[in-house]
Every structure is written in structure tokens, then in C-alpha cells.
Image (spheres, grey):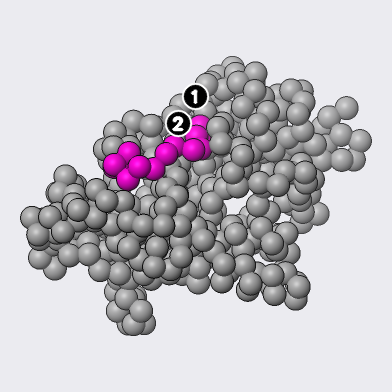
């Protein structure tokens, strides 16, 4: 008999964290997260998401073995931004058994119902500022940094449990060892016509801190009209900066300025999943040696986020960001680039991706579920 258990202690949290290591054991494209990072992520004292929203993790257990997991959580920031009463779920993993999936979704639904919601959305781990969406196409490639990988049968389980598509998110892939000709030709014209200056993140410690504050200002303004956007709190932003800065390459982070005023921001990260893939989730002397070797050989990068403040949109600033991302990235040996994620209704960004001759090679899907009794 399958039982659904709320995670209430460290032993149960360990079971929650370790389940994917069994389910994906034979999947060469799954990239194990660092186990210690997972413990920190689910620690209410270390993850600032818990400062404003509630989270409950669930396990599906049969004969003493964990066969599935899911989270149910609120997102107060989403409610504030969109005035939309909706609950959320995430971190879904399950054996290929409909009865397991049904019990997990019912547990998440009941938890959200008790919090006054009539629908829930996911997978969100925990919000749009982290890993989101179920991979429904593109299983033959490992995920880039901060992107999900899922079992192909999850889509069937989701839909058999009554979940309906809410929005698709695309990941575009560019594989090349030279600058796209069209963007190379346009960049100079756009800079001259727009008067916009693009600069990399400062490597000077004092200026770097000012740049980070500028990025937060741009971030707060540039995405406020995007579907599903949820602004980070200052605590979440600072926490994210603290986690990403050691991984970041300042030459792949850009600020656009017009007459000295911030106009936009672009962030690409070296694909550290190439490093995590050789560590197998653990920090040991041997895994650290493997990681140092793999770090020197990283050949891909992901453009994670790019935004332009509304008054400066339509001036080609996004194209300039791509130009400098290619220019600096190719110089460092990044010959594979992912642009993700792009909303299926973001026609402007899709046109830019097509101009760059990038191809949509992965699709992630957000689902909604009616949970009214």
C-alpha cells in the first residue's frame, strides 16, 4: 500500500533529496545536483523563499521504499504581483505508476485547498526565478545550468492526473564557433543609432557592488510586465547573487546604459552542469579534482536572463547583448550556447533567436490543475 507522508525531519528530507539518484540512475543525461546544496535549499533558515511563503514536502512510500515526491507551496510574491490566488507544486519525481502520481497530486491539491486556493500551477521549484516547467521535448540532451531534466513518462502522468497546459517555455540552442553574420553586421549600426553603451560587470570590488545594485534596479523594472513574473525580494536577490557570483564570469554579464542611466541587463553563466556531471552529487577529494579538470574544459554557456527597461525597448539593445555574449563567449571557448527560457508568446525574443539561427531544442511546460472540490 502506498502512503503519502509529509516531510517532517532530516531523515525524511534525505529520502526526498535522494530519490532522483535512484530514478535517474540509468539516464546519462541527468545531472545530479550537489547533495549539500539541496539540504541548504530546503533549509528555512538558509533559503529566503521561506521568509514570505509556506512550503510542505511530501513523500510517497511503499513497503518502506520512497516511490515518489512532490512539494506544495504558496507564493506570496506571485499573489502580490498578479492579484491571482493560486497555489503551486514542484519537485515532482515518481516511478512510472499512475497510482503514485495521483496520490502525490492529491496531497499537493489538498494542501493548497486548505490554504484557500482553487487551482495550482507547476512544476515550480519554487518560483519562476528558479527551475520551472516540465521537460516535454528534448530528452536526448543534458540540461544546462539551472534547468530541469525529467523522465519522458512524466508528461503522460501529469495529463492522466488532469493537469492542463498553462504555458510552454522554449530553450534555443546555438552551436557555432564564429559570430552570426547578421548580428555582427547589425551591432555597430544599433550602437551608433541608439547611443546605448554596453559594458561588462566590473571586476573592481567597490564598483561591483554598485553594479549589483544597478542590476537589481533593472531587474525590478524590466520584467514587471512579463507573464508570470515574480519579483525577488531583496533578500532573495542578495542570496542569489551570493550563490551565483562564484560561478559567474564578469565578461558574460552586461549592463546597457543610455546617457549614463541603466537601460538593460544580461546574464549568461558558464554551463557548470558540465562540472556537476562529474561530481555525482558529492564533494570529495576525488570529485573536486574531477571538477577542477572539468571547469577548465567547459564549452557551453546559458543566457539565463535578459531584460530591457520599458522606455528603452525596441532599440535593439537585446541584439547588442547577444553580440557581446557571442563575442566574449567565443573568445573563451564557449561554442554551444543556450538561450532559455523563452515564453511561447514572446514573439520578439523568438524572432531574435531565429535571427541568430538558434534552434528550439527543448520545450518545458507549466501546467495548471483545478483543485476545487
Reply above or below: 282 against 314.
Answer: below
Q: Nearer the viewer, residue 83 or 265?
A: 265
Query: Can residue 372 be seen from the camera position used here?
Result: yes
Badge 2 marks a residue whose secondary structure is strand
Q: Where's residue 365, x and y in %?
A: 51, 32
Q: Nearer the viewer, residue 145 or 131?
A: 145
The residue to which callout 2 is attached is 168
Which is closer to the viewer, label 2 or label 1? Answer: 2
* Mark 2 crowd level (few <14, some 14–19, many ≥20, 10 Å Cα): some
Cα separation between marks 2 and 1? 8 Å
Query: Can residue 216 be seen from the camera position used here?
Result: no
* Residue appearing at x 10%, y 65% in the figure: 259
Contact? badges 2 and 1 (CB < 8 Å): yes
* Residue appearing at x 82%, y 32% in the figure: 3
* Residue appearing at x 16%, y 59% in the figure: 188
Q: Nearer the viewer, residue 293 or 22?
A: 293
Badge 1 marks a residue whose secondary structure is strand
Answer with left or right where residue 155 lies relative to residue 267.
Answer: right
Reply above or below: 37 against 143.
Answer: below
Answer with left or right where residue 209 lies relative to residue 29.
Answer: left
Kindly identify which numbered label has been placed on residue 95. none
Amino acid at each position: 500500500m502506498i502512503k503519502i507522508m509529509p516531510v517532517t525531519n532530516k531523515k525524511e528530507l534525505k529520502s526526498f533529496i535522494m530519490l532522483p539518484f535512484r530514478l535517474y540512475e540509468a539516464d546519462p543525461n541527468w545531472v545530479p545536483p550537489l547533495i549539500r546544496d539541496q539540504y541548504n535549499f530546503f533549509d528555512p533558515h538558509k533559503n529566503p523563499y521561506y521568509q514570505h511563503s509556506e512550503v510542505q514536502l511530501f513523500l510517497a512510500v511503499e513497503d518502506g521504499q520512497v516511490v515518489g515526491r512532490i512539494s506544495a507551496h504558496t507564493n506570496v510574491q506571485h499573489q502580490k504581483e498578479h492579484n491571482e490566488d493560486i497555489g503551486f507544486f514542484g519537485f515532482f519525481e515518481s516511478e512510472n505508476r499512475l497510482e503514485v502520481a495521483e496520490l502525490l497530486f492529491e496531497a499537493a491539491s489538498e494542501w493548497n485547498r486548505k490554504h484557500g486556493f482553487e487551482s495550482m500551477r507547476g512544476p515550480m521549484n519554487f518560483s519562476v526565478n528558479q527551475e520551472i516547467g516540465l521537460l516535454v521535448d528534448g530528452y536526448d540532451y543534458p540540461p544546462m545550468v539551472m534547468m530541469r531534466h525529467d523522465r519522458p513518462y512524466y508528461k503522460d502522468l501529469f495529463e492522466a492526473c488532469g493537469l492542463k497546459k498553462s504555458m510552454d517555455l522554449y530553450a534555443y540552442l546555438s552551436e557555432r564557433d564564429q559570430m552570426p553574420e547578421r548580428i555582427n553586421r547589425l551591432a555597430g549600426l544599433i550602437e551608433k543609432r541608439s547611443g546605448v553603451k554596453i559594458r561588462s560587470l566590473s571586476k573592481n570590488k567597490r564598483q561591483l557592488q554598485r553594479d549589483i545594485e544597478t542590476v537589481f534596479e533593472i531587474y525590478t523594472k524590466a520584467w514587471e510586465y512579463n507573464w508570470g513574473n515574480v519579483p525577488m525580494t531583496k533578500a532573495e536577490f542578495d542570496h542569489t547573487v551570493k550563490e551565483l557570483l562564484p560561478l559567474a564570469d564578469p565578461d558574460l554579464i552586461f549592463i546597457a546604459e543610455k546617457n549614463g542611466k541603466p537601460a538593460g541587463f544580461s546574464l549568461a553563466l558558464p554551463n557548470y552542469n558540465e562540472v556537476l556531471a562529474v561530481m555525482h552529487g558529492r564533494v570529495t577529494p576525488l570529485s573536486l579534482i574531477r571538477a577542477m579538470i572539468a571547469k577548465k574544459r567547459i564549452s557551453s554557456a546559458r543566457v539565463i536572463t535578459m531584460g530591457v527597461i520599458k522606455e528603452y525597448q525596441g532599440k535593439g539593445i537585446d541584439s547588442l547583448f547577444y553580440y557581446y555574449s557571442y563575442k566574449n563567449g567565443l573568445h573563451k571557448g564557449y561554442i554551444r550556447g543556450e538561450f532559455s527560457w523563452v515564453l511561447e508568446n514572446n514573439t520578439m525574443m523568438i524572432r531574435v533567436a531565429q535571427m541568430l539561427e538558434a534552434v528550439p531544442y527543448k520545450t518545458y511546460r507549466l501546467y495548471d490543475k483545478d483543485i476545487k472540490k
